[in-house]
Image: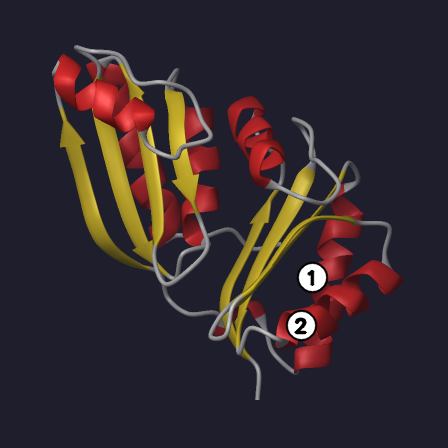
Amino acid sequence: MIQLRTYVYIDSLQPQLAAYMASVSQGFLPVPGDAALWIEVSPGMAVHRLTDIALKATRVHLSQQVVEREFGTMVVHHRDQSDVREAGRVVLQRMGAQQSDRAVCRVTWNEIIRGMMPDHTVLINRQNRRGSMILPEQSMFILETEPAGYVIYAANQAEKAANITLIDVRAVGAYGRLTIAGREADVDEAAAAAVHAVQNPSWS
């Protein structure tokens, strides 16, 4: 029995998120404006079968696949939104599932830290991140979700909503983590958009 944990459709990848995904992906790299589909299932090995179904049925490209013992993640993308939607449809059909069967996203942490100190920002910038750097005096928003994949949608919606800098997006494993930075007003707006996104995830 395959459990659908995360099912997130993104109509148009924003520039920073597309660049971030390209920095961590080992497959075909997405570009801004591509539609994307992020699916996470349990057990992890089942993701191979689902990936095969999506690639054979449509023209989508596989940008990422992570196979852990408990969770498996696949990320497909294409310039044509209809191909991405069709990939999702055939995967769900083979699973005997619907989008509504996906796990409800739980926000496990949600905080804005204002006026970051230099020591703190230097430490964050030296960590194993793939995004941009955070600067002293900026505000920082951090979000943690369960399941992990929902932070991808949160990051995309935050970037749509305000002029922020994407610092880190970790969307695999037991928990997802998002870090963004910028001017205080922009971070406030982006944080509200991110939280609303995970509480109301997209439907394709």
Q: Give the amino acid at mark 2.
A: Leu
Horizontal relation, residue 107 to residue 27: left or right: left
Q: Residue at point 79% right, 67% down?
A: 52
Could you tell me which quadrant the C terminus lies in? bottom right
Q: Residues within 10 Å of mark 2 (few under 14, many from 20)?
A: some
When the figure is inspected, residue 188 is found, relative to residue 43, above or below; the finding is above
Could you tell me which quadrant the N terminus lies in? bottom right
Horizontal relation, residue 38 to residue 196: left or right: right
Residue closest to the eye, 201 or 181: 181
Q: Quick check: can you spot residue 148?
A: yes
* Place of residue 166 in the rendered image (x, y in percent of width and height, measured from the top left): 41, 26
Q: Quadrant of residue 145?
A: bottom left
When the figure is inspected, residue 65 is found, relative to residue 17, above or below; the finding is below
* Place of residue 39 in the rendered image (x, y in percent of width and height, measured from the top left): 58, 60
Q: Residue at point 58% right, 32% down?
A: 23
* Place of residue 146 in the rendered image (x, y in percent of width and height, measured from the top left): 33, 60
Label 1 near label 2: C-beta < 8 Å?
Answer: yes
Q: Quadrant of residue 49?
A: bottom right
Residue underneath mark 1: 88
Horizontal relation, residue 39 to residue 30: left or right: left
Q: Give the amino acid at mark 1.
A: Gly
Residue underneath mark 2: 92
Q: Regarding mark 1 in the picture, which secondary structure is present there? A: helix
